[in-house]
Amino acid sequence: MAELIVEVWVEHLKPILGWLWGSAVFWRSVALASLTCLWVLYTQRKRLAARVLGVKSLDHDIDIFARSDNAMSEVSLSSLLDSLSTSDAYRSSQRHPLMDFIDFFRQAGNQYLDSHLRRSTAALTAALSDLLTFLAHHFFVYPRDQGGETDLQLCLYPELNIDRAGSGERDEVVRYHDFQKGLDVCIKRVSAAYRGYRAEVKRRLRR
């Protein structure tokens, strides 16, 4: 039955197909249409390639952001900065997300393809590194006996802070305030760098 239907259609279309196969106008039209398509593809090749690559780049950068955000979320960073700002102290575990974030972006395979995101990430990791360096140089375990607690509390020069182990003498107070100013500079740099980074993420990745 199917073969019969095909034969009927072939016989029905034979006059039209015969005209097309033998028509110079038809073949000229096909040739012109083909040349036009080739010309459009050639002239728009960069735009088409950019669009294809752009989709792949976007997917790559979204994945990089998701993985880096798992290393250091906004909540974990804010928790540390709040502790430092309000009490000049932090828990040892609070610095780990910052270290993980920096280590993540040190790996060659964990780089954004978007140049704007790369720049904002570099600024943020630099600010985080400066903060961690400040914490390493100027914060100390206090109190010494923390009852076997493994997540130790560290404080900004406790021996200069009258509320901790300081004597309250003017020289100690002045020195402590100087260190507080240095800490405040580091905190503000990190906050500004993180805001800039997240602004770029939102602008570029819609995240």
Image: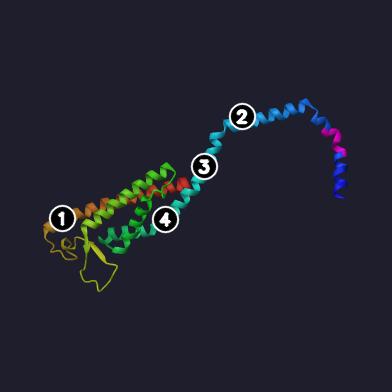
Q: Amino acid at mark 4?
A: Asp
- Measured from the top left, where is residue 50 in percent x and y? 52, 38
Q: Which residue is mark 2?
A: 39
Residue under the image location 38 percent in, 45 percent down: 120
- Residue 69's tag is 4
Q: Which residues are magenta?
A: 11-17
**Within the image, what quadrant is residue 68 found in?**
bottom left
Left or right of 175 on screen, residue 26: right
The residues tagged by marks 4 and 2 sit, at their Cα atoms, a distance apart of: 45 Å
Q: Earlier in the sequence, mark 2 or mark 1?
A: 2
Q: Secondary structure at mark 1?
A: helix
The residues tagged by marks 2 and 3 sit, at their Cα atoms, a distance apart of: 21 Å
- Measured from the top left, where is residue 33 in percent x and y? 69, 30
Q: Amino acid at mark 3?
A: Leu
Q: Residues within 10 Å of mark 1 (few under 14, many from 20)?
A: few
**Front disc: 4 or 1:** 4
Q: Amino acid at mark 2?
A: Trp
The residues tagged by marks 4 and 1 sit, at their Cα atoms, a distance apart of: 37 Å
Q: Which residue is mark 1?
A: 175
**Front disc: 4 or 2:** 2
Cβ atoms at labels 4 and 2 below 8 Å apart: no
Residue under the image location 27 percent in, 51 percent down: 130
Q: Residues within 10 Å of mark 3 (few under 14, many from 20)?
A: few
Q: Earlier in the sequence, mark 4 or mark 2?
A: 2
Q: Nearer the viewer, residue 166 or 3?
A: 3
Q: Earlier in the sequence, mark 4 or mark 3?
A: 3
- Residue 53's tag is 3
Q: Earlier in the sequence, mark 4 or mark 1?
A: 4
Q: Amino acid at mark 1?
A: Arg
The majority secondary structure of the magenta stretch comes to helix
**Front disc: 4 or 3:** 3
